[in-house]
Image: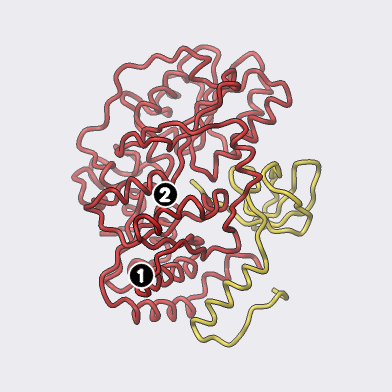
Amino acid sequence: MCIGIPGRIIKIDGRMATVDVGGAMRNIALDLIEDASPGDYIIAHAGFAIHKVDEEEAIKTLNMIREITGSVEDYDAAF
Amino acid sequence: MKHVDEYRDSALARVLVDGIRQVADRPFKFMEVCGSHTVAIFKSGIRDLLPRNISLISGPGCPVCVTSVEDIDKAAAIAGMDGVVLATFGDMVRVPGSRVSLQKAKADGADVRVVYSPFDALKLAQSDPSRKVVFLAAGFETTSPAVAATLGRAIEAGVKNFLLLSVHKTIPGAMRALLDTPELGLDGFICPGHVSTIIGTAPYRFIADEYRRAAVVSGFEPLDILQSTLMLIEQIREGRPSVEIQYRRAVSEEGNPVARGVLGRYFEASDANWRGIGVIPGSGLKLKTEYAAYDAERVLDIKIGESRETRGCICGMVLKGIKNPPECRLFGKACTPETPVGACMVSFEGSCAAYYKYGAR
């Protein structure tokens, strides 16, 4: 039940945001996070954003996996 | 970057599995606490990919599955009251109580609604002020802050007919109870991802410090889980049990203090009865006394008879990881996802439902 779905904030109106979750537009409450802006990725759970996805950390994790697996190609911010 | 597909690359997965194979020089037993991990592991076939000496066992991390029979009985009693609407998350309505599930109560005339967000329950209350809307609030730390924030909005808007029946639970106490179960013999935990988004890593430190077991907070995609498994094995081999985060894109050491602040404003720790496990001190959440006006247990006169567990169901041992679902004599016979006898067969994240769906042995 603790499913969290990543989505991208399209616009913000007060404490509510319109979030693109895999192509579907959802109204998501922002009461539980700070400093959200349009363009940010968030993790949505039960109608609330519970976390702002850290893009830099995401890239680091993928690069770490690539390092373990000996793959040369790096993910970069262009993704 | 969409934060999903990047973590499903099969070529990378194969190399990670090879890496695990190289270091797995003895049997290792890890528990994935979270039901979403259980589903991800089955769906991606990770159990079959891993070498045989690595066992991943499912834990008690499905809030639907661990809701006690007594709590379901209370919810069914509330649903049957005049002028009351009972709202809750989808799977909760199918959990068997002593006599009826909420679904059965609805068929018998009670007003039971399924909502996606606690917000929807608040909207129901606002749309009909003549009736009390009771939200049966189940869920771990991922969910409870959302419920707290919803209560905050209800209070702000002056809504008086919105009540909570809190059956919220917190995870670290249950993990301690599992570590105190000697027959389990766990080497470490795949810690729940989104619970950790809220609580951070500090609440898990006892796992490494007191019990000398490994702990890694993992994401939910196949590469996440494989990398976490490798990290767990390395912690043990190198003799440095600790709490590490693999799921860095969604979890930080400090967690989400804003969410914890909202939660702490309205809720405080209480003892909680876990189905099949029993009472774990301090592992529940109840509304603080100053919010008693929103607490269904304090406002309503809830009368239930003696609650009784389903006979023959071994959910308790499944939730603790002591037995696998196919070891239950009801599994796949009297108990299926269509006609669940035990709670673990109800939610699609329950261990029994996952074993059934993916045909695991």
Q: Would residue B333 appear left or right of B255 to someone viewing this image? A: left
> What color is chain A drawn in?
yellow
User: Residue pushed farthest front?
Assistant: B209
Between B343 and B56, the one nearer to me in the picture: B56
Instruction: Classify A5 as above or below B114.
Output: below
Instruction: Classify B164 as above or below B9.
Output: above
Amino acid carrying mark 2 in the image: Glu
Between B168 and A47, the one nearer to me in the picture: B168
- Residue B143, image x, y percentages: 55, 42
Amino acid carrying mark 1 in the image: Ile
Instruction: Classify B281 as above or below B17.
Output: above
- Residue B326, image x, y percentages: 23, 52
**Element type at marker 1?**
helix
Specify the color scheme: by chain
Is the C terminus of chain B in the top left, top right, bottom left or bottom right quadrant? bottom left
> What color is chain B drawn in?
red
**Residue at the spot x=27%, y=71% of the render?**
B52
The residue singled out by tag 2 in the image is: B349
**Please, which chain is the residue tagged with disc 2 on?**
B
Density class for disc 1 (Cα within 10 Å; few <14, some 14-19, many ≥20) is: some
- Residue B295, image x, y percentages: 54, 21
Between B23 and B73, the one nearer to me in the picture: B23
**Residue at the spot x=80%, y=41% of the render?**
A14
Gap between marks 2 and 1 measured at Cα = 29 Å
- Specify the quadrant of the image occupied by residue B264: top right
**Please, which chain is the residue tagged with disc 1 on?**
B
The residue singled out by tag 1 in the image is: B236
Is the N terminus of chain B in the top left, top right, bottom left or bottom right quadrant? bottom right
- Specify the quadrant of the image occupied by residue B177: top left
Between B37 and B92, the one nearer to me in the picture: B37
Density class for disc 2 (Cα within 10 Å; few <14, some 14-19, many ≥20) is: many
Q: Would residue B305 appear left or right of B123 to someone viewing this image? A: left
